[in-house]
Image (cartoon, helix red, strand yellow):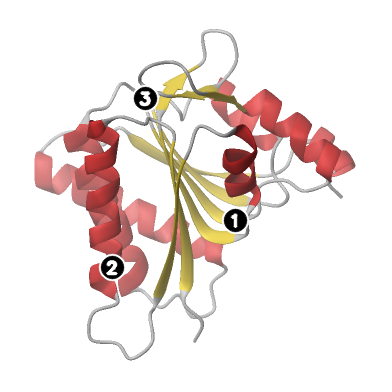
Amino acid sequence: MRPRRVSLLDIGLDSSFDAAMTFVQGTLQNFNAGYDEPIVDIDFVRSRDPNTVLTAFTASCDVLHVMAHGDHSITPTFTSTDEKTNISLEHLGEIAAEQGKGISTGAILADGCKTGTGVWQKAVRDCLQGEVTYIGTSSIIGWHESGVFCAAFYGALFRNRGKGMTRAEQAQDAAERAIKAYTLLTDQSCPFRVMTLKPSRWAQKVLA
């Protein structure tokens, strides 16, 4: 059985995001312990170079996990803490159209504030190569919320072999389990939301 590939993309670019990404990487690496062959391959990108970041967005993987500040004051944008690095989904969609290659993954985990709103969903659909499970947030989140959900999500994803399920369906199931686990563990409503997103008509036309 081939290992699942998780692409971790840090656009927050400060010490707090570094600590959070280290936690996620450690969690994923633990799943490989005791196996002769890895069950998860981890790609990690932390960069300000636009081409490097855009390449990471469109690389094929099972889960694309993006950590950044979520901003939609003008257009949905992943932003660094110092605001010197900004990756808008509108620009990503334009680059994808030029290259004929969009986001190709089973799931997108947009680990930032308010990334699950309608305006974000619409923008993401313009960047998609195919149907994905999209996990975003409905409110402002902190490191505790992110850490609890991510641990539960990846724990569920790698506990379930997902036989007979597509990679998007596997992520959907894991996210739903993680949302329930979050509520049970914290006695609070989970700020993460999961949904299925399909390419927009524009994306279907330019990325076909």
**What is the x, y in percent for residue 181?**
20, 52
Residue type, mark 3 in image: Cys
- 184 lies left or right of 190: left
In this view, the mark in front (2 or 1): 2
The answer to which of marks 2 and 1 sits earlier in the sequence is: 2
Horizontal and vertical percent position of residue 97:
82, 37
> Picture coordinates of residue 30 (x, y %)?
23, 70
Q: Which residue of the protein is positioned furthest toward the top in this rendering? A: 73
Contact (Cβ within 8 Å) of mark 2 with mark 1: no
- Residue type marked 2: Gln
Q: CA distance from mark 2 to mark 3?
A: 26 Å
Q: Which mark is residue 154?
A: none
Q: Is residue 207 left or right of residue 129?
A: right
Secondary structure at numbered mark 2: helix
Above or below 165: residue 90: above
Q: Which residue is mark 1?
A: 105
Q: Is residue 88 above or below residue 205?
A: above
Q: Is residue 109 visible?
A: yes
SS class of the residue under badge 1? Answer: strand
Q: State the residue position of label 3.
A: 113
Q: Which mark is in front, 2 or 3?
A: 2
Q: Which disc, if any, is residue 29?
A: 2
Residue 189 shows in this picture: no
- The three-letter code of the residue at mark 1 reads Thr
